[in-house]
Image (cartoon, grey):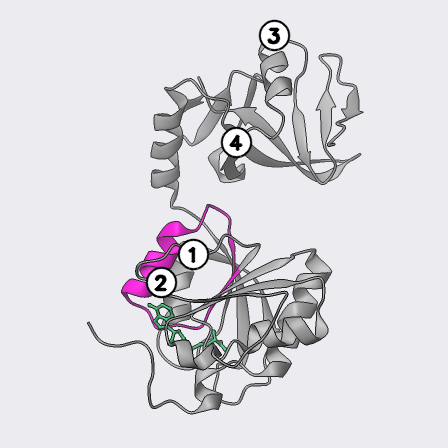
Amino acid sequence: MQSQTYEDLSFEALNTPLEDWRELFNFMTKKGLKTLFDAGAGNALSAQVAQAEFPDLSVHAYEIVGDRMAALDLPNQQLKVCDLMLEPIAKCDLTFLYLPTGPLLERILLQLPHHALIAAVESHGDLFDRLDECCELVTTIKMHAKRHNPFMRIYRYKVSTPDLRQKIRELSTSESLLQLEIKDSDLINGEYIWSGDIQGCIVESSGIIETLWPARRFSINDVVAINKAKWPELVLQRRQGLWRKIIVSPVALKETPQGERIKINEN
Ligand SMILES: C[S@@+](CC[C@H](N)C(=O)[O-])C[C@H]1O[C@@H](n2cnc3c(N)ncnc32)[C@H](O)[C@@H]1O
């Protein structure tokens, strides 16, 4: 297989510059994103900037060429020398990609959950074209780097609807407390995410999902994640009719059959 380690590349071509990491980290701070996975981290400028200037952020910088990170001492960051063709990715709030298209990229994409956020930069090649196929564009960030495309792109990854539909149908058949997380909004609460049991749900050919607990119908396009139940006892109580919606964010709430919303004590 062709090497993707770029032995002969200059420092500038290999690494995204400091200013652009700052821009990205300011974006993350504004959005409340705390962890970044730098997939193929080069000299780990990502982790160096986070260590020096963004104490609330944690960078997981994985790189195959050990020498590129050998001299670094970054106590608050997670540096790892490894081959991402063999090792699993780090599950973070944001995955950073500055890689060519090909098997490594595909392997990383396969491990991302539905609705994962990706930050991507491109200097040449067709990374953006590949991501356009499977992601929706959230926003762009103007870059300082001279060798890169002038904009960094923030994407939201979407497992294709046929795949997601198939996955939900498979999971619906077994006993579990797994939850579909669904985005929603209303006038009082604005945007929020609630969760419903995947067990026993029906996925119609039209893309409408009907859950049993709570009894609701919504579009598969509103499903943002499939997760373990955060509050298993509430999920079991809901099956007994005690609760309707369980709201997971931005504020954790449980809804009574009368529609009253009560804060969930998360401790
Ligand atoms: C273009 S550089 C990007 C560096 C850094 N992400 C940045 O933007 O500053 C891509 C890096 O990915 C690394 N890489 C390539 N294949 C890899 C693999 N299989 N596992 C881990 N890292 C890999 C290369 O060695 C290179 O340092």
Q: Residue furthest top?
A: 240
Is disc 1 surrounded by few (<14), some (14 to 19) or many (20+) residues within 10 Å?
Answer: some
Q: Which residue is mark 1?
A: 89
The kind of secondary structure element at disc 3 is loop
Q: Nearer the viewer, mark 3 or mark 1?
A: 1
Is disc 4 surrounded by few (<14), some (14 to 19) or many (20+) residues within 10 Å?
Answer: few
Residue drawn where x is 31% and y is 58% of the image: 86
Q: Earlier in the sequence, mark 1 or mark 2?
A: 2
Callout 1 amino acid: Ile
Residue 11 position in % (x across, y down): 46, 89
For the residues labelled 1 and 2, say whether their Cβ atoms are less than 8 Å apart.
yes
The circle drawn on residue 240 is 3
For the residues labelled 3 and 1, say whether their Cβ atoms are less than 8 Å apart.
no
Q: Earlier in the sequence, mark 2 or mark 3?
A: 2
Callout 4 amino acid: Lys
Range of residues picked out in magenta = 95-118
Left or right of 3: which side holds 14? right
